[in-house]
Amino acid sequence: MTTTTPVAPNAQLTVSVSKSARPSHARGREALVGALMASPALFLLVVFFLVPALLAFGLAFTNARLISPRPAHLVGLENFRTLFADSLFWASLRNTLYFAVVVVPAQAGLALVLALLVNAKVRGTNFFRTIYFIPVVTSMVVISLLWRFIYQPDGLLNHLISAFTLGHWHGTDWLNNPSTAMPAIMFMSIWQAVGFHMIIWLSGLQTIPGDLYEAAALDGCTGWQRFRYVTWPGLLATRTFILVTITIAALSLFTQISVMTQGGPLDHTTTVIFMAVRTGYEQQSTGYASAISLVFFLLVLTVSGIQRFVTREKV
Amino acid sequence: MNPTTPRRIAAMGLAIAAALGLTTACSSGSEPSGASTAGGVTTLKLWTHNGGNAAELGLDKKMVADFNASQSKYKVEVQSFPQASYNDAVTAAASAKKLPCIMDIDGPNVPNWAWAGYLQPLDLSANTFVNQLPSTLGKVDNKVYSFGHYDVAMNMTARKSVLVANGIRIPTVDKPWTGAEFDAAMTKIKASGKFAYPLDLGTAGTGEWLPYAYSPILQSFGGDLVNRTNYTTARGVLNGPDALKWATWFRGTVTKGWAQQKSGADSTADFVNGKTAVMWTGSWAADAVTKKFGDDVVFAPPPDFGHGPKIGGASWQWGMTATCSAKDGALAYLKFSAQPKYYADFATTLGLIPANTDAAKLVPNFAPGGKYEIFLKLAQKFAEVRPVTPAYPFISTTFAKAAQDILAGGDPQKILDKAAADIDNNIKSNGNYKF
């Protein structure tokens, strides 16, 4: 009696064990395959991004030089003390934040407007989509050089202004005037990158189900109401993504500064990254530049963290 | 087919590992430093900053071809880089331990690169450089690290007809303009209305041009980039009252409308096209200018702002890297290239001052009575080398930024004080750059 009864539960046990074992065994295998597929990219990411970043953060506490016959020593927080007392750093930080605060809403807003326009069911949208995207795929160095010529005192922009105002205003030396240098660079940067974010908004717009629009039309919505109650809520995921990516891109402003103004008239266009590259490479102070990079990393982390917190999905 | 079978997983893992292994193996193949030997011929790498400069690169290649043809033991290979990124390329290569055997160095950088261990002293006999122009020899700690084939003389290029039309005296090497005379001359030319901006100081330049062009004027006022008694501080010379006078004068050229805050991209072209009257430039522009204006051109010494006219000195020089594994080959090439005929080639083709007195006799333009003899005289009388110190690259970038900020209208005393403080901090934090 006792010998037969254990058989039945045992048999059932093994059956149930093997039933649940097969799915988790397969799940484990899928996870392994997934890990293997991701491993080359992860390996490259770790070797070329994570490891140098960690090394750089370590260098921030030394007096390492790019060229030096003497080895680097640990100097603790000396670099940071010098950094926070440096007026150039505060000017760079101020300019970087100024750029981000203006460019993020302006570029995102303009991209959204363009996406709404391009999303309209009229002929020629493909043509406009291409036109808006061309600056995105052009090298930023090339664009900076071209716009430097456009912004010259006797350049294209001033000629146009002269023509449109019938000679009343001849424009100004855009890049050498401390008050117009940064706005000029902002304008050019927005022009260059707006196409990219327009495409992202467009993809978000096209995921909104059409029957929501039909329902809105049936309810007699105006265009603005349609945008506010159907389109905007449907773009939640897209706008979170765009907010974060534009912010990070805006905070890392470098190429335009390096080519057009080299820190600009009286430090009005220097940015944190530009300062880091200049001190680390031209002035050969690798330790100091690493300190700048570390501070910048913490800044971007904080800003992104705040943004993620504000835009989190409130379940 | 199920991709998650153990066999398939193993195959996938192997494939990925093999791919990674291949890529790392390919990238870790390191070349011997700057030279390699194969079949009895040692090939040495030579780097030059003349990328894009067809005339000078052609001369470098000619020297190399002649050397290669003259013997069969060594073969030199030329690699050229654009000048703007040359220094960065060398620094990056040094960090990666991939320097060539022979390379050219901008004169003022020689002490820094020697201190950093990039260069080694040239082990050549004492009389190899006996006829060399002193400013073109890279001597650090009494050891010769490099030598140059040419030097350049900065000058105020102007047209005689313009000066005479405005009643301005034509200056000579013995009697240059005084500061006051120069200012008055600029005011007169500006008032004539024929030139929107009569003076071209080359303010569109960046990088090493800024200290090269503007520190001599600073020195003429009595300031300097760093105290040259022991090169440990810039305080008092870079931010003293004389330096302040220079800064005020410098910004004054813009506010008085004589010069643009950012000049045109090509000063020579602007001068040749008649857009400017006086150009502060180097003797490299001499050929283009004489071609257009012939005898109407005058190469004037810079004004004497109180401490004598001053121009820059030292240009690109050839040296041997410390990591060169074919030292004999490199020295053989350098000795070969130091023949007077090559100095004469540079002078004739590029209009630059030959850095060797024997060679100067071979070049008609620089011989006594020659049309470019004025440059030789300017170099001999007024040339002041940039500070011979390993701190120079830092001093250079700091001064470049200060000059741009002063031109843009910033508070000159504050700018100069900060520049001097930054230089002092840098020198101190490098232990006074002791060897």
Image (cartoon, rainbow, N blue to C red):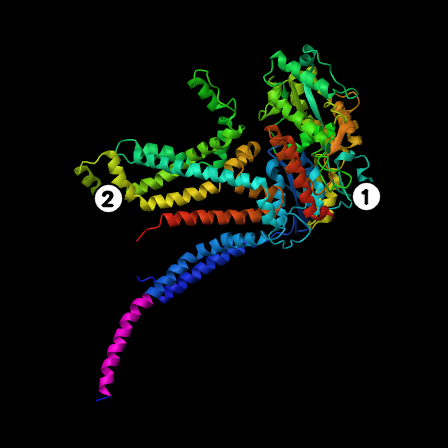
Res. B67 in view: no
Q: Is residue A218 magenta?
A: no
Q: Is residue A17 magenta?
A: yes
Q: Residue furthest left?
A: A218
Gap in angstroms between the C-alphas marked 2 and 1? 85 Å
For the residue labelled by badge 2, is the local secondary structure a helix, a strand or a loop?
loop
Using the image as rendered, state which of residue B316 and residue A261 is in the foreground. A261
> Quarter-wise, where is residue B313 in the image?
top right
Q: Identify the residue at image location x=34%, y=34%.
A: A114
* Quarter of the figure that contains the N terminus of chain B: bottom left
Chain name for mark 2: A
Q: Amino acid at mark 1?
A: Ser
Q: Which mark is residue B125?
A: 1
Q: Nearer the viewer, mark 2 or mark 1?
A: 2
Q: Amino acid at mark 2?
A: Pro
Residue B106 horizontal/vertical position (percent): 68, 37
Using the image as rendered, state which of residue B148 and residue A144 is in the foreground. A144
Instruction: Tell me where the magenta segment starts and ends, as one range.
Output: A3-26
Find disc 2 in the rendering and name its residue: A209
Q: Which mark is residue A94?
A: none
Residue B226 horizontal/vertical position (percent): 72, 37
Mark 2 vs 1: CB contact within 8 A: no
